Amino acid sequence: MDRKKINKKTLILYFGIGIGVVLAFFAIGFAIYSHWKGIIVDNENGYNGINSVIALMALLMNIITVIFVFATYDSQSKQISQNKRDTDYNRALDLIFRQLEHTKAKLSLDNSNALAEFINKNSDLNRVALNLDLRFFEYDNFRIYSRALNFLAIEFEIYYNVIVNTTLNNDDKRYLLSIAPHNINSKLIQSLNIFQNHYQLFQASDEYQKFNSNLKNNIENDLFLILGYLRIPQVQGLELTDE
């Protein structure tokens, strides 16, 4: 629901409460005045019950004033909060698309082949479902994985820092975090999920212990960072490190 509509309804509610209180106090005042008039007679000074009713009306006006001051403050506070949210959101959105220009420029220079191969190879792995594929263990393939993941880890850190340092709610942050990967390549998120599933199988295999430890560490570190930056859930059984 639109926040402005909510604020309008809130003001109407406060106004209705105020009118209700006014009518209630008038009814009570009239009842008190009628009661005193019927049982109290001051022959020397005259009946002064009306003064008490006026005092009650003054109290009523003070209460109504407080109600409307609170309603105005509450409405303004919500509007200020909404304005800050809109400012943060638009600023983050602007920075994301500005950074995307730099990311795409870097891709066009020397990283596009590695990223494209990373995505293509994960598409191939997806066809064999969750079964070990010997092509996954080839050293040249791991160099491609490492290069692509390192590039993504460096780039996504920038987007992550821009977004998390805002006051936006988690839904807004999650949406903004999804913009960069979808604009870099629409299959990137899917490829990362395929990769982490197959890497988990790789870790459970005998081949894992035989493989180049430095290359494995680099891949695991970068994959850990990327999943964290993009808030992608890590598959069960996958062991990653940020060191």
Image: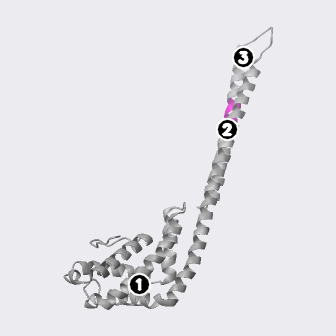
The answer to which of 152 and 41 lies nearer the viewer is: 152
Which label was assigned to residue 66? 2
Q: Residues within 10 Å of mark 1 (few under 14, many from 20)?
A: many
Q: Position of residue 211 (x, y in %)?
A: 24, 84
Cα–Cα gap, marks 2 and 1? 62 Å
Q: Which residues are magenta?
A: 21-27
Magenta-colored segment: predominant secondary structure: helix
Inspect the magenta stretch and tell me whether residue 24 lies in it: yes
Circles 2 and 3, Cβ within 8 Å, touching? The answer is no
Image position of 66 with respect to 213: above or below: above
Q: Residue at x 40, y 72 (%)?
A: 225
The three-letter code of the residue at mark 2 reads Val
Secondary structure under tag 2 reads: helix
Which label was assigned to residue 38? 3
Quadrant location, the N terminus: bottom right
The quarter holding residue 188 reads bottom left
Q: Residue at x 48, y 77 (%)?
A: 155
The quarter holding residue 212 reads bottom left
Q: Position of residue 31 (x, y in %)?
A: 69, 25
